[in-house]
Image: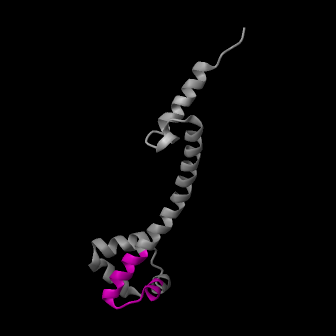
Amino acid sequence: MRVKSGIVTARRHRKILDRAKGYRLSHSSNVRKAIETLLHAKQYSYVDRKKRAGQFKKLWIQRIGIALESLGISYSKFMANLKTAKVALNRKMLAELAVKQPEIFAKIAKLG
């Protein structure tokens, strides 16, 4: 007797179509197109996770630079002074201090 896989295939297709919900045109209703679209979506999300890290670093540098501008110090000199003073604060923490606690950031800026 031949074994039919209709139920199994239908479930697999349903899972794919559920994940593709909200896509435009036949990408949400045609299984082949949905599979292709989901594969691309996974690829884009992987690449964009890497890009997001760089975008945050840019943002932190801008925030630190703006805070230093009011103190009359350049960003490059500030970072060099931090290294020589062996201050172990990363850009994320420095940007947080610059935005939320500018008086403490000013003290750190005067260290170098």
Residue 61 appears in the figure: yes
Asked if residue 85 is positioned above or below residue 28 in the image, the reply reads below
Q: For this rendering, which residue is in front, 97 or 45?
A: 45
Quadrant of the image occupied by residue 6: top right
Residue furthest to the top in view is 1
Relative placement, left or right, of 52 versus 95 is: right
Position above or below: 1 against 27: above
Q: Is residue 78 magenta?
A: yes
* Residue 61 position in % (x across, y down): 43, 76
Quarter assignment of residue 31: top right
- Residue 16 included in the magenta stretch of the image: no
Q: Is residue 56 above or below residue 46?
A: below
Instruction: Note whether residue 108 is visible.
Output: no
x, y percentage for residue 27?
52, 41
Using the image as rendered, state which of residue 45 and residue 97 is in the foreground: 45
The image's colour scheme reads one colour
Tell me what residue is drawn at x 54 percent, y 54 percent.
Answer: 44
Q: Quadrant of the N terminus?
A: top right
Q: Which residues fall within the magenta stretch?
A: 61-79
